Image (tube, coloured by chain):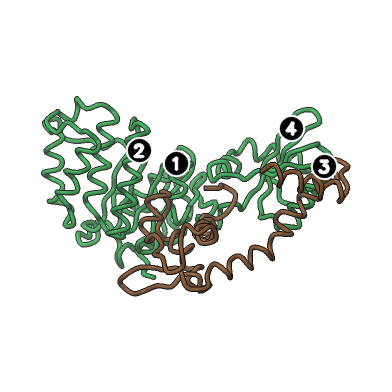
Chain colours: A green, B brown
């Protein structure tokens, strides 16, 4: 497997605020990554450093074998779709697609045309007159049709409706299957993209919380619900990442897989087991208030 | 797709179920990796992992440049394995629930017989 990106100790500060704090990260060739985390976690800053738009304060960064900043041969192989891309005032949508092949050597004009039809994008309208969703569609089309070996989508679909988002997922998968490349998806719509991802990197407060295979994460946490005393005895010596309760009923989310014997034991205790989706898992892990709260209770219990 | 278990395992099971119930006959071609990926909206690497388990298991064979096919004897082997797993997957939980309701084994057997006649 070829490594496309290798970052070590990557750090970025804005005054006294540390946006990215000693991040180690590797991206392998031809995989789809999810770069997930809350607002302000540092996702965009990381991507801006990887694409040479920001200089890291500390750490080493290697993209396609070199530092990305000011190396044209590295930058040419990357495409970064920003959340709110700005275009010149005089630009119509058509101009964006005319200019795109100057920057992306793998640009596929026929694929772009198909996507323009799929998203029903009016080509002759000035960019500033496009709706929020249509503006996002412009970015999504550029990101897909550029077929860059390393493509970043940073919250690409603000304002896109559910139909358009599914067109994006479908086209992304179909095209990725035929033209494998490294894709980094950063989004808050975690449930929608969870199955597309091969690998998940979770960022919180500028640090990596976990960096794991998506298959490994699935079923890695379980919610146990039932009578409070039964729940407490079942989770007693397990790592609890979330708790809720109402009167005599309680539910606790535990980190760790349950085997068949443990499932039978839970059923015998009259407990309900429910899977935890990637989105719920991330809420448990990055909801700092909740986490502090559950730690307190654990100490008390 | 079931949230609680790895998707690649579910892909494996889906093909196994299709072989057991005859939807995929022995010698039949199974869908390609990309067909699995786009149909289920999952990462192709996940689909590949699921199908490779069938290949390693000898349930499916790859024919270079053509596709993947169900092997001879695949169905009989899968049925035998599922029978071995039947007790833990179905009988044990059934007994646990029956005991909770105060049903003894004879009553349980009678219920199973009655259910079978109805259906």
- The residue that disc 3 covers is A230
- The residue that disc 1 covers is A192
Q: Quadrant of the C terminus of chain A?
A: top right
The answer to which of marks 2 and 4 sits earlier in the sequence is 2
Position of residue B47 relative to residue A239, above or below, is below
Foreground: A67 or A138? A138
- Asked if residue A192 can be seen in this view, the reply is yes
CB under 8 Å between callouts 1 and 2?
Answer: yes
- Residue at the spot x=59%, y=38% of the render? A287
The answer to which of marks 1 and 3 sits earlier in the sequence is 1
Of circles 4 and 3, the one toward us is 3
Say few, some or many: other residues with alpha carbon within 10 Å of mark 3 (under 14 / 14 to 19 / 20 or more): some
Check chain identity for marks 2 and 4: say if they share one. Answer: yes
CB under 8 Å between callouts 1 and 4?
Answer: no
Q: Mark 3 lies on which chain?
A: A
CB under 8 Å between callouts 2 and 4?
Answer: no
Foreground: A173 or B53? B53
The answer to which of marks 1 and 4 sits earlier in the sequence is 1
CB under 8 Å between callouts 3 and 2?
Answer: no
Quadrant in which residue A250 is drawn: top right
Query: Gap between marks 4 and 3, in whole Å?
Result: 13 Å
Query: Gap between marks 1 and 3, in whole Å?
Result: 34 Å
- Residue at the spot x=36%, y=55% of the render? B35
- The residue that disc 2 covers is A165
- Answer left or right for A206 relative to A229: left
The numbered disc on residue A245 is 4
The answer to which of marks 3 and 2 sits earlier in the sequence is 2
């Amino acid at each position: 497997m070829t490594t496309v990106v290798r970052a070590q100790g990557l750090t970025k500060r804005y005054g006294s605020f540390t946006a990215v704090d000693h991040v180690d990260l590797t991206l392998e060739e031809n995989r789809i990554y999810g770069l997930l985390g809350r607002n302000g976690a540092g996702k965009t800053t990381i991507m801006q450093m990887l694409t040479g738009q920001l200089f890291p304060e500390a750490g080493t960064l290697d993209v396609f074998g070199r530092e990305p900043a000011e190396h044209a041969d590295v930058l040419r192989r990357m495409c970064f779709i920003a959340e709110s891309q700005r275009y010149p005032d005089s630009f119509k949508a058509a101009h964006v697609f005319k200019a795109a092949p100057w920057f992306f050597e793998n640009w596929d004009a026929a694929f772009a045309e198909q996507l323009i039809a799929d998203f029903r994008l009016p080509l002759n309208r000035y960019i500033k007159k496009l709706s929020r969703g249509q503006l996002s569609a412009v970015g999504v089309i550029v990101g897909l049709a550029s077929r860059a070996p390393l493509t970043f989508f940073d919250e690409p679909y603000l304002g896109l409706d559910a139909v358009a988002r599914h067109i994006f997922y479908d086209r992304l998968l179909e095209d990725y299957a035929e033209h494998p490349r490294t894709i980094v998806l950063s989004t808050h719509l975690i449930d929608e993209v969870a199955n597309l991802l091969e690998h998940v990197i979770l960022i919180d407060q500028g640090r990596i919380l976990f960096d794991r295979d998506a298959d490994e994460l699935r079923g890695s946490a379980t919610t146990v619900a039932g009578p409070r005393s039964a729940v407490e005895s079942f989770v007693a010596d397990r790592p609890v990442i979330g708790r809720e309760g109402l009167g005599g009923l309680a539910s606790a989310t535990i980190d760790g897989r349950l085997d068949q014997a443990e499932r039978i034991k839970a059923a015998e205790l009259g407990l309900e087991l429910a899977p935890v989706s990637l989105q719920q898992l991330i809420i448990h892990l990055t909801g700092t208030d909740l986490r502090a709260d559950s730690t307190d209770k654990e100490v008390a219990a | 797709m079931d949230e609680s278990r790895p998707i690649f395992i579910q892909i494996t099971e889906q093909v196994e179920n299709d072989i057991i119930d005859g939807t995929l006959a022995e010698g039949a071609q199974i869908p390609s990796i990309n067909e699995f990926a786009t149909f289920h909206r999952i990462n192709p690497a996940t689909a590949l992992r699921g199908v490779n388990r069938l290949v390693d298991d000898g349930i499916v064979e790859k024919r270079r440049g053509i596709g993947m096919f169900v092997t001879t004897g695949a169905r009989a082997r899968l049925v035998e394995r599922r029978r071995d797993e039947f007790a833990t997957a179905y009988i044990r939980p059934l007994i646990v629930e029956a005991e909770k309701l105060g049903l003894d084994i004879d009553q349980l057997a009678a219920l199973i017989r009655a259910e079978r006649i109805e259906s």
